[in-house]
Image (tube, rainbow, N blue to C red):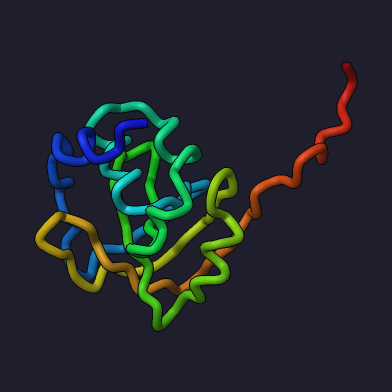
Amino acid sequence: MRLALVTLLALPALAADPGEEVELSSATVTALSCAQAAQATGKLAWLTACPLEETQKGLVVFDVAEKQIYRLSPKTVRVSDLERAFGGGAVDVTGVVKSSDKGGVALVEVKELRVTPKPKAGAFKGCL
């Protein structure tokens, strides 16, 4: 994937207002550059196929329904919780927007977090 090219085309998201309540259900955990690529192109494959090296810049949560990017406050969420959901898992989040950065990414102070980890390979044993 040509991540650098797509990231340049990404438009900043509309930032959420400080104090706004946020409720996310089955939101995807990914790197900021991959979330911006998915937002700009509409191709959600960027979210789960994000290269691991992109996570060095930090993890964000992408709300697929609203196509909004959120950064969760490190004061209220452990990075290890987000890492468990990276690459195919999901999180449910309830919180309040504290601020937004210049790129339009809202910082959320989390009140409640539920992590659904990425399924292990071979975990599905359904009928074939």
Residue at the image point whose x is 75% and y is 46% from the top: 120
Residue at the image point whose x is 35% and y is 59% from the top: 22
Residue at the image point whose x is 22% and y is 70% from the top: 19
Q: In this view, does 127 lie to the left or right of 100?
A: right
Q: Is residue 114 left or right of residue 21?
A: right
Q: Quadrant of residue 42?
A: top left
Residue that extends furthest to the left in the rendered view of this protein: 102
Front-most of residues 48 and 70: 48
Considering the image in quadrants, where does the N terminus appear? top left
Front-most of residues 113 and 120: 120
Front-most of residues 57 and 69: 57
Q: Position of residue 6 (x, y in %)?
A: 23, 34
Q: In which quarter of the image is residue 61?
A: bottom left
Q: Position of residue 108 (x, y in %)?
A: 32, 68
Residue at the image point whose x is 43% and y is 51% from the top: 30
Q: Is residue 64 left or right of residue 11?
A: right
